[in-house]
Image (cartoon, helix red, strand yellow):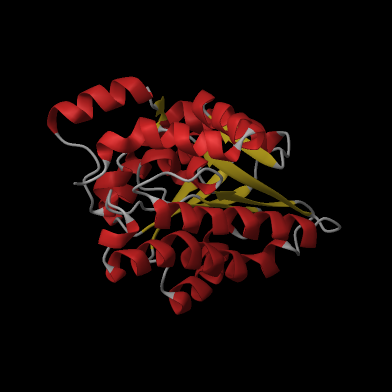
């Protein structure tokens, strides 16, 4: 898709990759409706947009609230006149513990945000996208959506659901005007842990682990994503780790699982 003069909705636009996607699309000449539950974050995104801020509308929305989401398309259309694309980027992680030690409230919250919220947004906006001459749905899964990560099993399950939902949408919409892509970020330097209300790292472990992982900067991740969407790529792997683990997992799922388990073992709560 050529994003110039297009109206794109981005969930999770108040921070991290969502913020950087917003800023990158503005540079491409798009108009953006940034959606997030964090009003302060959205206002900061709009402020950072500077001279382009007139092309950004902000919408404080809990995407797990179905009725609020269903009312959102008309609100955005009243501001921008149309809707050309939806990037479902919002997501949270779980506490870094094994399934046996995970509370049901945390399980339900992760599934509600990562899968249900994405599905509500897709269902709400798809009828409007189908009316456009060219439109796009891009859903952010995760490297953890195709590769099991110990301590993030429920998060991974939610992102695997996003993967299959998106690929199913691609098949269903193949003969329509709506392009569909699924995105698999690897380790990225964002504040997802803080936004999720969990602590994945602490103290010395944090510094050592982050040095090993060498997370991709959020703006670099956004550039890779936008480039992939401009080329209408079916799958977009973000970061060398995502590309490498996709190759390794396809080659040998068991070996790849054992490999990532060894790498991540130190992060699991005792």
Q: Is 226 located above or below residue 270 in the figure?
A: above
- Along the line of sight, which residue is nearer the eye, 117 or 130? 117
The residue at 30%/48% (across/down) is: 41
The residue at 75%/63% (across/down) is: 130
Q: How many marks?
A: 0
Can residue 4 be seen at all in this image of the molecule?
no
Residue 155, horizontal then vertical, whole percent: 41, 54
Indicate the quadrant where residue 103 lies.
bottom left
Residue 263, horizontal then vertical, whole percent: 37, 30
Can residue 133 be seen at all in this image of the molecule?
yes
Q: Is residue 197 left or right of residue 56?
A: left
Q: Residue furthest bottom?
A: 67
Residue 33, horizontal then vertical, whole percent: 49, 53
- Along the line of sight, which residue is nearer the eye, 194 or 62? 194
Query: Quarter holding the N terminus?
Result: top right
- Along the line of sight, which residue is nearer the eye, 156 or 169? 156
Q: Is 235 located above or below residue 248 in the figure?
A: below
The residue at 40%/37% (across/down) is: 261
Residue 12, horizontal then vertical, whole percent: 41, 51
Q: Is residue 42 left or right of residue 125?
A: left
The residue at 41%/53% (across/down) is: 153
Q: In this view, does 224 lie to the left or right of 53?
A: right
Q: Which residue lies furthest to the left in this view?
A: 203
């Amino acid at each position: 898709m050529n994003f110039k003069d297009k109206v794109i909705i981005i969930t999770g636009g108040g921070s991290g990759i969502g913020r950087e996607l917003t800023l990158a699309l503005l540079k491409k000449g798009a108009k953006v409706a940034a959606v997030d539950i964090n009003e302060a974050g959205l206002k900061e995104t709009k402020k950072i947009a500077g001279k382009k801020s007139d092309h950004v509308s902000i919408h404080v929305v809990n995407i797990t609230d179905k009725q609020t989401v269903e009312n959102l398309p008309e609100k955005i259309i009243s501001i921008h006149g149309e809707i050309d694309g939806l990037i479902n980027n919002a997501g949270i992680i779980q506490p870094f513990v094994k399934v046996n030690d995970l509370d049901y409230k945390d399980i339900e919250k992760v599934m509600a945000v990562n899968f249900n919220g994405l599905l509500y947004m897709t269902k709400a906006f798809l009828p409007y996208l189908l009316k456009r001459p060219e439109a796009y749905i891009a859903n952010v899964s995760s490297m953890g959506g195709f590769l099991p990560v110990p301590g993030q099993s429920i998060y991974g399950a939610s992102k695997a659901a996003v993967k299959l939902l998106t690929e199913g949408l691609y098949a269903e919409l193949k003969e329509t005007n709506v392009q569909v892509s699924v995105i698999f970020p690897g380790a990225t330097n964002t504040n997802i842990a803080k936004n999720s209300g969990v602590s994945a790292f602490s103290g010395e472990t944090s510094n050592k682990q982050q040095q090993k992982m060498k997370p991709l900067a959020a703006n670099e991740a956004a550039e890779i994503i936008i480039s992939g969407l401009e080329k209408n790529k079916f799958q977009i792997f973000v970061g060398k780790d995502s590309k490498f683990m996709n190759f390794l997992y396809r080659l040998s799922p068991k070996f790849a699982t054992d490999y990532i388990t060894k790498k991540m073992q130190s992060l699991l709560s005792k």
